[in-house]
Image (cartoon, coloured by chain):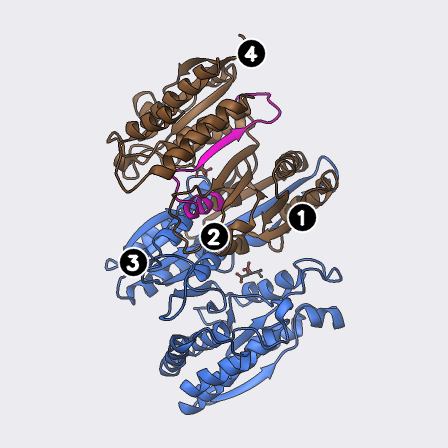
Chain colours: A brown, B blue
């Protein structure tokens, strides 16, 4: 395949996933074409609906096939909360998390920016512009643990957080590298090392060690509880946050909320060693309550497509999408537009 | 001892701890005297400073002595962040957490109210008035875990969250009882059961089971990440939150921030089975940077004293302290008052 072809896997998923993905593809196609990039698409049926029809979450052959692609554009998955036919969390764990773990997406990159024209729930948000580098392949997400004497008064349930020097070091180094590329060059480690001593000290020691390689980057530390306070009192203090899988899950939803909502929050599940394709998805879920009604905001999906282009080395095309989004957002009034109308407007602004 | 004597243990601690505790005692003494309650005090020297002088965190004899008291009023502990003489987290774990665990403080009660006259960082905070019932004796706080091959590229660090039917059921039942006593009668379980399956399902099943005993209470569920979003977009939706030790730590700091800051956030570490004394403390820490300068707001410590009276069955005296605090807060302008001036004003308003 030529250097300017993207062999793209598309997983639209459930609920609003297909709607927002359609708009992301609309914008991605136009931006790619303008820069002479050929976009080849393979669509995969996966998610809660697919599970209901087939009983499959993520078959080995599908995973093997996905591995051959350059990148994955992901919509959203998940059943309606009331749907008792689907065992709770099965799609999240056996499909979404399985992809992140199998494809070694150790950098879960989640930028937060308060774009001009966007309302924050904060009275004085200040200039919010930071990225969270969330570890994506270990920590409390490993699925290690168990239940003893389930359903009895003597039940014991455990969850084991697994943290390795290999896993922590590679994501910390990635975060320092990104901090070094930003104007403020500031990194904040978020953890809870005064309570989670073993994991916490591994993270702290690793940050201290890797910091030696990046003398131009300043770094500090916040406990996760204190970090949530700063997120509402002074979010502008953050530049690059590096943190574990669970704290990253929590802090990025909060970050998205203070920056105008998860309708705008993009993310990349990135394998920086490039041994498998990376995956780009909006932070929001499948929102079954508004699915199929053209009510969802596709902006997060569109910004995720920009992160995808950036990761594949098409920086100029990524910048154009971002600029088109920023222009569209700045002009958004209170008028309600359909999902496709927003996609059309951003595509037109390219 | 007569029914109207309180045999009180006082642990002022470090930093601003002694200052805010002095004001809490000032108000507590006056409120007690007015209601014919005799207050006997035993002060304990514990904390970072005490560790530096003696190498003691919490000796067995001190713990045994504390057990004989009716309740504990706690200030704050912790060394200055830069003080490398004190091993990081040792005071928190071997003193504060050891007290919570040894005295079986399974209900970590943290009310959040946006008092009239208090500024929230939220543009539209709405009517914030909820309590968090945080589990206090298990979960990821048990200190279970370890490190293998520390300091090598092959290091593995684990943290084990331990959850028992016994531990979860008693705190969930307490939360339902509190919800049942409140006008809105609404309970929200906060967890992450789609990822932390084993612990999460124990919590979910327990809530479903205990709900049968409280048909008048409605309940819902939020993942911790979604809960942080609601905390900044619609905190008025919450009435009673029940959650585990770590999620409770995170959500209560965020709750304090949106309700006007941790200068106002009180807490009780409560043993509802009354097999050992409960302990009441402001949510804030020892703030070494402003210690000894009469700059700290003692309101959180004073409200913690009200929670103490309430727990010991002196509801009317507790209500009077709360009313005096509410009156004082409503009249607070932008004028800066010293720690003792605030204590004096609240005592005078009793
Ligand atoms: C759906 C869920 C498993 C997922 C996570 O916890 O990582 C989501 O909350 C996210 O942040 O992408
Ligand atoms: C000091 C620390 C151990 C403590 C905790 O994590 O519980 C504090 O943050 C709190 O919330 O009381």
> Ligand 1 shows up in which quadrant of the image?
top left
The alpha-carbon separation of the residues under discs 2 and 3 comes to 19 Å
Q: Is residue B245 left or right of residue A222?
A: left
The residue indicated by pointer 2 is B247
The spot of residue B199 in percent (x, y) is: 46, 46
Identify the secondary structure beneath mark 3: strand
Who is closer to the viewer here, A91 or B82?
B82
**Label 1 CB less than 8 angstroms from ligand 2:** no
Magenta stretch in the rendered image: A251-279
Q: Are marks 2 and 4 on the same chain?
A: no
- Name the quadrant containing residue B241: bottom left
Residue A201's mark?
Answer: 1
Q: Can you tell which of label 3 and label 4 is closer to the viewer?
A: 4
Q: Nearer the viewer, mark 1 or mark 4?
A: 4
Q: How many marks?
A: 4
Relative vertical location of residue B143 with respect to residue B290 in this rendering, above or below? above
Q: From mark 3 to mark 4, how far is it between C-alphas?
A: 58 Å
Q: Chain of mark 4?
A: A
């Amino acid at each position: 395949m030529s250097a300017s072809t993207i062999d793209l896997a598309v997983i639209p998923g459930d609920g609003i996933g297909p709607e927002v993905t359609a708009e992301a593809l609309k914008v991605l196609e136009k931006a790619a074409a303008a820069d002479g990039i050929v976009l080849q698409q393979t669509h995969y049926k996966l998610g809660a609906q697919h599970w209901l029809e087939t009983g499959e979450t993520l078959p080995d052959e599908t995973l093997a096939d996905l591995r051959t692609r350059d990148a994955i554009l992901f919509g959203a998955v998940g059943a309606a909360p009331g749907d008792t036919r689907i065992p709770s969390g099965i799609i999240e764990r056996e499909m979404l998390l399985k992809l992140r773990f199998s494809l070694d997406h150790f950098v879960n990159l989640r930028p937060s920016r308060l774009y001009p024209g966007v309302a924050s729930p904060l009275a004085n948000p200040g200039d919010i512009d930071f990225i969270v580098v969330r570890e994506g392949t270990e920590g409390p997400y490993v699925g290690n643990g168990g239940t003893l004497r389930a359903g009895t008064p003597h039940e014991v349930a455990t969850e084991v957080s697994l943290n390795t020097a290999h896993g922590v070091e590679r994501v910390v180094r990635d975060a320092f590298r990104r901090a070094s590329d930003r104007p403020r060059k500031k990194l904040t480690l978020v953890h809870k090392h005064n309570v989670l001593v073993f994991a916490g000290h591994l993270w702290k020691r690793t940050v201290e060690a890797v910091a030696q390689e990046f003398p131009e980057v300043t770094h500090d530390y916040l406990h996760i509880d204190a970090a949530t306070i700063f997120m509402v009192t002074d979010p502008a203090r953050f530049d690059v946050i590096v943190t574990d899988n669970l704290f990253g899950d929590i802090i990025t939803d909060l970050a998205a909320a203070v920056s105008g909502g998860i309708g705008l929050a993009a993310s990349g599940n990135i394998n920086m060693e490039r041994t498998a394709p990376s995956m780009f998805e909006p932070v929001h879920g499948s929102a079954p309550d508004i699915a199929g009604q053209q009510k969802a905001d596709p902006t997060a999906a569109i910004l995720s497509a920009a992160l995808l282009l950036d990761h594949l080395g098409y920086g100029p095309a990524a910048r154009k999408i971002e600029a088109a989004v920023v222009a569209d957002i700045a002009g958004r009034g209170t008028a309600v537009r359909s999902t496709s109308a927003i996609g059309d407007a951003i595509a037109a602004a390219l």
